[in-house]
Amino acid sequence: MAGEEQSSEHHVPIWGIFLLFIGAVFLLQTTNVLPWALWGTLWRFWPVLIIIIGLGILLRHYNVWLVSLLILVLLFTSLGIAIWQFEPSLPTEQTTKSYSEPLDSLERAQIEIDFAAGSLTISSLPPASLNFVEVGTDVRNGDTGIRVDFHRQDSEGKLQLIREQVNGPSWGEGENRWQVRFNRNIPLVVDAKSAASNIDLDLSELKISELRLDLDVGSYTMKMPSSVGTVNAYIKADLSNVEVIIPDAVAARLKADVDLSILEVDESRFTKKGDYYISQDFDSAKNRIELELDCDLSRVLVK
């Protein structure tokens, strides 16, 4: 009969296949088989996802395993082409630049950092340093550099550090390394954006009252401030591997909004209570961190 002759439809697990692909790429990057900067080339293949969704609709009457195999072939073919197109330029010219700003009468500062495709470390200056900031850059590409914009008004300063591109986008075209150190004796508000990078933030000796991080496609490690009173931190991460280290003497309250992500929290320190992970002594702690995570397709470790 007509009702019995209807052809069956198969629902292809497109998002499951996509997650397997992303996980495989992350594994190859965390084991140093593929460079993180490859995302700058691979990202151009986003229309393949639209093609895959279309195939899932058009071929819904076919064998689900056959369609899944076809989708995997498309994804890994895209990866192969991206690897083939990814050609880091040889370091024909290496220039090392440095920048420093004296502390003088500065009592507080706002920091904005925009960094992509390289490695960035942030830490503290020696206790007796007379500088507010010291920046060292090691740029192995003649088309990239650092742009510094600093304004001082009375006892407050505002510093912007931006990766400068001279001849258009240059992800994957060389190696860019920044080492940034701040004075540990004045309060700081830090707002940083990064993509396709390896970043190591050692904030343990800095007086950071507010921290905002917008992270895309990379590996990020951050050690939070250890003795600054209350710190408000917000971390947004997409397609990233993020590790947050909270010093032993610091209490924390964590709220996490994670979509298709892996969240690992040390529950021996931060007990799950409703929507929060919280230290038992949070309300009475002298040093504590209010941390909010907003993560998509990422792995996040909090310990």
Image: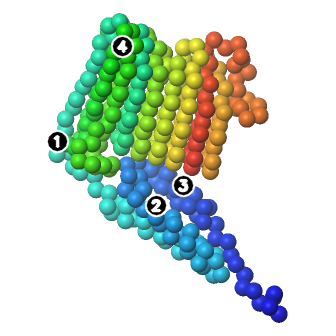
Task: Work out whether mark 4 precedes mark 1 in sequence or the reverse, and give the earlier one.
Answer: 1
Name above or below for residue 153 compared with residue 135. Answer: above
Q: Looking at numbered disc 2 in the image, what kind of residue is underneath it?
A: Trp
Q: Are marks 1 and 3 in contact (CB under 8 Å)?
A: no
Question: Which element type, helix, strand or loop, lies under badge 4?
Answer: strand
Quadrant holding the N terminus: bottom right
- Residue under circle 2? 46
Question: Which element type, helix, strand or loop, lies under badge 3?
Answer: helix
Look at discs 4 and 1 and give the one toward the viewer.
4
Residue 23: numbered disc: 3
The residue positioned 22% from the left and 29% from the top of the image is 97
Name above or below for residue 261 compared with residue 54. Answer: above
Residue 153: numbered disc: 4
Task: Work out whether mark 2 precedes mark 3 in sequence or the reverse, and give the earlier one.
Answer: 3
Q: Are marks 4 and 1 in contact (CB under 8 Å)?
A: no
Question: Which element type, helix, strand or loop, lies under badge 2?
Answer: loop
Name above or below for residue 288 compared with residue 78. Answer: above
Name above or below for residue 213 compared with residue 248. Answer: below
Q: Looking at numbered disc 4 in the image, what kind of residue is underneath it?
A: Gln
Asked which quadrant contains residue 246, the reply is top right
The Cα atoms of the two marked residues, 2 and 1, are separated by 33 Å
- Residue under circle 1? 93
The Cα atoms of the two marked residues, 3 and 4, are separated by 47 Å
Look at discs 3 and 4 and give the one toward the viewer.
4
Asked which quadrant contains residue 4, the reply is bottom right
Q: Are marks 2 and 1 in contact (CB under 8 Å)?
A: no
Single out the residue that lies furthest toward the bottom: 1
Q: Looking at numbered disc 3 in the image, what kind of residue is underneath it?
A: Gly
The residue positioned 46% from the left and 29% from the top of the image is 191
